[in-house]
Image (cartoon, rainbow, N blue to C red):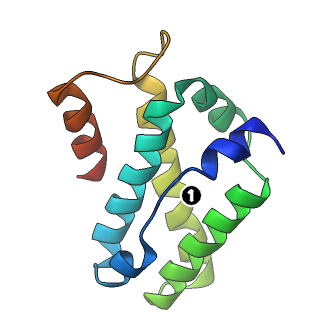
Amino acid sequence: MHVVDVVLGKIEIDEAKLQELSWQDACASAGAAIFKVLQAHPTIVPLLVSQIPVGPNALAQRERAVAFMLACGFSPELAARAYSAVMHYVFGYASQLPASGSLQQSGAGAANSTNSIAT
């Protein structure tokens, strides 16, 4: 299994909680969860930007997200585009943060970054 896929398997998203949210808030919540993992593993960000992850964890994550959007009334094409837009936003945001060793920040800085990605 590719290291990127192992890291993507660490993303924890409470799907039951997402069902209670609007699709906009659910996308923000999922994006924040993904960003949290990227903060802990900043060296995979360039790998995510350079190629589409296709391992089992990446595919399962993608399928769950698209299924959620379909359940919210998105057409298949729009669900795929929305998923892609959210992921590009999260990966792009993560790729702009300092990567010298770690994206982890101390105290309020880390909380502010996670809150920024969720809004």
Residue neighbourhood size for the residue with mark 1, other residues' Cα within 10 Å, grouped as few (<14), some (14–19), many (≥20): some
Between 9 and 118, the residue placed more toward the observer is 9
> Is 11 placed above or below 106 here?
below
> Is 87 placed above or below 92 here?
below
> Is 88 placed above or below 113 here?
below
The residue under the point 18% across, 26% down is 107
Label 1: which secondary element: helix
The residue under the point 73% across, 48% down is 53
Whether residue 118 sits left or right of residue 67 in the image: it is: left
Whether residue 64 sits left or right of residue 33 in the image: it is: right
Residue 66 position, x and y percent, is 58, 75
The residue under the point 70% across, 45% down is 6
Between 15 and 28, the residue placed more toward the observer is 15
Q: Which residue is mark 1?
A: 84
Residue 18 position, x and y percent, is 37, 76
Whether residue 24 sits left or right of residue 69 in the image: it is: left
Residue 48 position, x and y percent, is 65, 37
Quarter containing the N terminus? top right
- Tell me where residue 94 sits by quadrant: top left
Between 24 and 19, the residue placed more toward the observer is 19
| In the image, farthest residue toward the right | 1
> Is 73 placed above or below 92 here?
below
Q: Amino acid at mark 1?
A: Ser
- Tell me where residue 23 sits by quadrant: bottom left
Residue 74 position, x and y percent, is 49, 84
| In the image, farthest residue toward the top | 100
The residue under the point 28% across, 79% down is 22
